[in-house]
Image: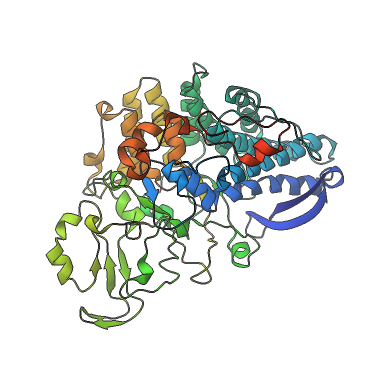
Amino acid sequence: MLATLFITTQSCESFLEEELVSEVSAGTYYTTESGLEDAVDATYAWLKGFYGPERGFTMTTFGTDIWTNGADGSHKTINLYDGALNATQSYMNEAWRDWYRGVNQANAVINRAEEVEMDEALKNIRIAEVRWLRAFYYFDIVRTYGDAHLSLEETEGVEVEANRTPASEIYEQAIIPDLEFAIANLPEVQDDYGRATKAAAEFLLGKVLMRRSYTSYAASNDAERAETLFSNVINNYGFELLPDYGDLWDINNQENSEIVWNLTISKALVDDGTDEEGHRGHLYFLFEYDVRRGMVRDIENGRPWKRFRPTPFLLGLWDRSIDTRYDKGFKHVWYANTEVSDERGNLAIGDTAIYIPGPQKDIEWPQSRKDAAPYLVYTEEDYTERIFPTMSKWLDNTRPDRQHTQGQRDVVLMRLADAYLFRAEARLKQGDPAGAAEDINVVRRRAAVPGMEASIEISAGDVDLDFLLDERAREVFGEHARWWDLTRTGKLVERVRLHNAQAAGNIQDYHVVRPIGQDQIDRALGGYPQNPGYPQ
């Protein structure tokens, strides 16, 4: 088998970087120590095709209760749940393709590792990494498409036969055994930042078990096991919540005490174009500031692609008198970067040009006050698909120029606050709302306005599944979580109908899984079954 792979190697910065290696023969190269190391590193690369670019943000953000579409983009069907969300939709085909490429890469490493002569302890760690990755890919496949093809053997050459294995069996045969092996064999710390660790394996298995706990084929102890796993992550590895929620989004503070596992992005490889994707989240959540008075597009404020805008429901979730997370996750002020002299007055560079007060502050800005201000003020009645509050989590002022689409942020996929919220969910699932409230309060106290720590706390009587989903929205908005949160808990259709006006009229029960792509249907011998509800 010939493969063209992104190979990740250790750098002087001690994190995984990528270089392109072409025409690699797995039969000869993978069976050497250096070949195995490169093959393991390359297995990480298929995550980057989903989690850095628009595809992953779209498939996890659109069509939920907290985000809807902005003015631009070609994939609004994923938010609208209209007839174009079918087997021909490109993201549905591409995600399936790349996740299975990751699976096959992992299978190749696992199948060929036995032939490699190297330190056995190190080889066992590398196999554990790859099994963690294979579980990750299969988990993404199952939680997106449901029943799917299962193979634990390397595909060599052209294969036209495909099975349709129940999701329950994919959990039992692949995902859970792989993660149990990873937990047993991964170290607590790796030399290269960004490699899988024991904590990352426990975190992922906890998420897997929580999703399965809601299904008809759940094991009776799924939530109990998940609670134990998240307790291990919380207690055993020295992770700590950052004191300030806003510090999480400081681009100079990415390798911090709260991060359990990040998908690492190299600035050098992004800036020189070797990594053609990078982290593009900085593009998608921005309103169209760059055609407004006193503003032109610049690096600091970003390139506004206007893909995702917050729903009114999301904007109403925070009580800003006690909770800082809206203020530290959204941008409020744009400072003039070009001089203006007009009938409204003069703006010098550095003066306030645009102000979005945001929820609960709009009331302070009646139209008369907005008209009298020397700068533009946008309140709720002004919001459109082009004008809306801008999420600032992924802004990237390190890009080499204002047009550069690839960002260099790491992709945050596992962090300690999320572990607390998942443990809260596991406790609630077991009938322990008091324990759930304890975990939620840890997260809420960190988010409190100084002096309001007691006021922000909740009690056991406040906690139910809807409250927990609201809390997850307040904490992890924009972090590749929401669509999977809602499908996991069985709340997608209900909440979209309540809170996403663009999607409410179209969403149906079958939309809890995505359509199987036409590429898979056409290439499988005898065709491949489509998910129920979607056109065949």
Quarter of the picture holding the C terminus: top right
Camera-nearest residue between 55 and 27 = 55
Q: Position of residue 18 (x, y in %)?
A: 67, 56
Task: Indicate whether 103 appears above or below 368.
Answer: above
Residue 307 seen in the figure: yes
Toward the left, the furthest residue is 368
Q: Is residue 460 above or below residue 388?
A: above
Find residue 135 and report its image quarter.
top right
Which residue ends up furthest to the bottom in the rendered image?
A: 341
Q: Position of residue 319 (x, y in %)?
A: 23, 45
Looking at the image, the residue that sits furthest to the top is 220
Image location (x, y in percent) of residue 203: 52, 35
Q: How many marks?
A: 0
Q: Which residue is found at the position 36% from the left and 76% from the top?
A: 337
Q: How is the image coloured?
A: rainbow
User: Residue 271's quadrant in the figure?
Assistant: bottom right
Residue 520: percent from left, percent from top: 66, 38
Q: Is residue 258 visible?
A: no
- Residue farthest toward the right in the current orientation of the protein: 28
Q: Is the N terminus in the top left, top right, bottom left or bottom right quadrant?
A: top right
Q: Is residue 197 left or right of residue 380?
A: right
Along the viewing direction, whichever of 108 and 427 lies nearer the viewer: 108
393 or 295: nearer the viewer: 295
| Front position in the image: 516 or 148 | 516
